Amino acid sequence: MSNHTDIIDTLAETPVELVELRRRRPEAVENAQRSFEALFEPTDDALIRALPVATRYAVAAFIAGVSGATRAAAFYTDLLADEDESLVAVVEEAVRAGVSTGPYAGGDFVLFGEGALAAAFDFAHLLTFHPKDASPAAIGHLQEAGYNENAIVSLGQLIAFVAFQLRVVHGVRVLAGSGEIPEGVEKRAGVAEPGWAPAAATLQPEVVAPGKFVAHPLGWKPWVAPLEKGELTDAHMDALIKPERADMEYFRLLARDPQALKARTLTDLDIFYNTAGGLGRAERELAATVASRLNGCEYCASVHQGRSKEEGGDAAAIDRLLDEGVTADLNSELWNAIRDAAVALTRTPFEFGTPHVDALRAAGLDDLAVLDVVNSSAFFNWANRLMLTLGEPDVPKRYR
């Protein structure tokens, strides 16, 4: 298993000077590793029964493979072989059938056959390449394949975490001067209608969906049943970090896998709020907003555009980003360079390369700040995949 080696540094072959630089965000490094351990080496027997370890490794190897991340694919395949060697060939066949590019929206669901593992691959392909197309029917597809609420939360966290992990690995390798951009591939054609349907346990809330990206707060409603407040144990409350989150359905849903939730939250806080050097807060929130805009996550974009403005970010530039998309001129060499870097890291396979690092440095960033751009962009490829695929945004009544 992991033996507490830092997986990101192992996969990135991080040189000593960047190992030290990554530790300038110590909680982010430590809790990204804890996220790996929580999701791939769980200690809760109920979570292991809900989502077996072999399935976890198989899904991770599949995501890395279809994303063109060859070192990570080999890493997860080796772990899978130790757990269940018979699944290695199954994953390799699925990877050959699923290599694609994204993000995209509007159809082309690539399907992987019958059975529980195939359903997990269906869901992983959706989350990896076109999370904007998620729906209650996708949740129903997992439920019909035998996954319960805890398994769906753990699976969603795992897929989203690997999206983050692969991007940090790639970004660190590029910053070290050794990152290769995976060969370009065509978007894989699939079916426009996968034939999935909500199951009896699928929540189908009534919402007013935002018709566009907005600069005001949004609500969010789940498709998977969250824990009730009365079900929250001390372990759940500890995982929430902030007790007021017990009132939020999103966090009570993620609390179904409390170790993963706690590690994810602590990773988030250090990436965005550790301001000992590096990138400004407004610029970190800009990177989050850019990733969210490209992935199609109206909820995350609404939150983080506001935080960028609160931290002194250019409100007019942010509004253009929301209105026009990621090609909008942000009226600043630095902001345009951050935008380009966040877009390149968000695309799959990853387009982030040496020219992006050069542009960020030319705009005045040191390597710690460039690492902050990588971390902030990568993290929102984790956050977006949870918000988009476990529920949907809702326009509050005062904004309708």
Image: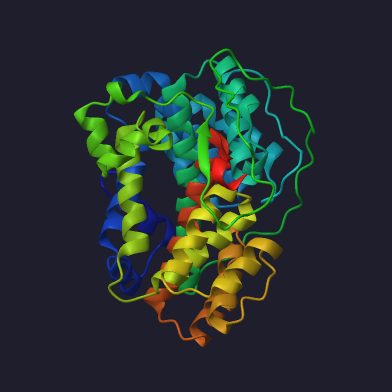
Count of number-bearing discs: 0
Residue 255's image quarter? top left
Say how the picture is coloured.
rainbow
Q: Quarter holding the C terminus? A: top right
Residue at 59% in and 40% down:
127
Percent position (x, y) of residue 304? 48, 58
Q: Residue furthest left?
A: 234
From the viewer's perspective, tell me whether residue 276 is left or right of residue 98: left
- Where is 199 relative to 74, above or below? above
Q: Residue 87: image x %, image y %?
A: 53, 27
User: Can residue 272 be seen?
Assistant: yes
187 or 284: which is nearer to us? 284
Residue 325 position (above or below residue 335): above
* 351, 288: nearer the viewer: 288
Quadrant (top left, top right, bottom left, bottom right) of the N terminus: top left
Instruction: Give x and y (percent) for residue 157.
Output: 45, 38
Q: Is 112 positioned to the left or the right of 124 in the image?
A: right
Q: x, y (%) of residue 108?
A: 76, 38
Point 65% across, 43% down: residue:
132
Taking the view exactly as shown, the residue that stands out farthest to the front is: 398
- Tell me, yes or no, if residue 72 can be seen here: no
Q: Report whether 202 appears left or right of 83.
A: right
Q: Residue at x 65, y 68 (%)?
A: 320
Residue at image coords 44%, 62%: 307
Picture layout, residue 124 above or below residue 32: above
Front-most of residues 238 and 373: 238
Horizontal side of residue 38 vs 376, given as left or right = left
